[in-house]
Image: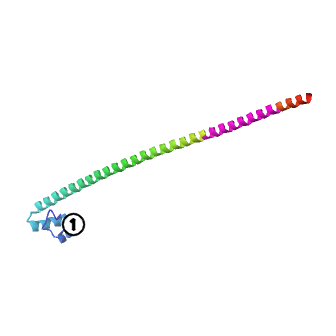
């Protein structure tokens, strides 16, 4: 208001806030307006001011929506990164399971190899025993 009507004092603005009829009277006194002209000026100012406020609110809303979109994009990006990380963790878990299975098979193989060696040793001992029995029987027969 102060920009529109510079001749109004701070006291005038405070006293006249929301009182269009009294404002029209003060404009008539300070600016020499007629009653109709004063009311027209007030309506023009109100319409302009309301339009400016509406435009500002719309501009603010658009800015908020752009910020919201940026935030949503960042959230989506973080979600994708999280999904990628979860996938990598899953891959690592699968790799660990495979490594554990390989280790288990290696242990079983080592156990089987140990049993085979034990069996070879047992067969070798049985052969030696059989040989000794034959030698002993041959020695008794002489």
Q: Position of residue 125 (x, y in %)?
A: 79, 34
The residue located at (10%, 68%) in the rendering is: 30
Assess disc 1: are there few (<14), some (14-19) or many (≥20) residues with their C-alpha within 10 Å of its C-alpha.
few
Residue 128, by quadrant, is top right
Q: Nearer the viewer, residue 52 or 85?
A: 85
- Report the span colored magenta: 103-129
Specify the quadrant that holds the C terminus.
top right
Q: Determine the residue located farthest toward the bottom in the rendered image.
A: 11
Name the image quarter holding residue 83: top left
Residue 95 located left or right of residue 44: right
Rendered view: 76 above or below 108: below
Give x and y (percent) for residue 11.
18, 72
> In front: 73, or 125?
125
Visual colour scheme: rainbow
Q: Establish if 53 lies above or below 19.
A: above
**Residue farthest left in this picture:** 32
Image label count: 1
* Residue placed most toward the observer, 110 or 72: 110
Q: Quadrant of residue 5?
A: bottom left
112 is within the stretch colored magenta: yes
SS under mark 1? loop
Residue extending farthest to the right is: 141
Per the image, the residue denoted by label 1 is: 17
With 127 as the anchor, is 112 left or right in this view? left
Please state, as top left, top right, bottom left or bottom right, where the N terminus lies in the image. Answer: bottom left
Q: Nearer the viewer, residue 7 or 92?
A: 92
* Residue at point 21%, 54% (across, down): 51
Residue 105 percent across, percent down from the top left: 63, 38
Question: Does the stretch in magenta take in 11?
Answer: no
x 19%, y 68%: residue: 13
Q: Main secondary structure of the magenta part?
A: helix
């Amino acid at each position: 208001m102060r920009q529109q009507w510079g001749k109004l004092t701070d006291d005038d603005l405070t006293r006249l806030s929301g009182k269009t009829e009294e404002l029209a009277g003060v404009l008539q006194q300070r600016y020499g307006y007629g009653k109709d002209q004063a009311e027209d000026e007030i309506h023009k100012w109100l319409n302009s001011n309301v339009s400016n406020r509406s435009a500002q609110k719309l501009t603010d809303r658009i800015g908020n929506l752009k910020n919201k979109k940026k935030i949503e994009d960042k959230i989506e990006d973080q979600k994708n990164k999280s999904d990628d990380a979860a996938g990598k963790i899953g891959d690592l878990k699968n790799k660990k399971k495979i490594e554990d299975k390989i280790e288990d098979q290696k242990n079983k193989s080592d156990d089987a190899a140990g049993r085979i060696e034990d069996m070879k040793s047992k067969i070798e001992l049985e052969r030696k025993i059989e040989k000794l029995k034959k030698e002993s029987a041959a020695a008794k027969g002489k």
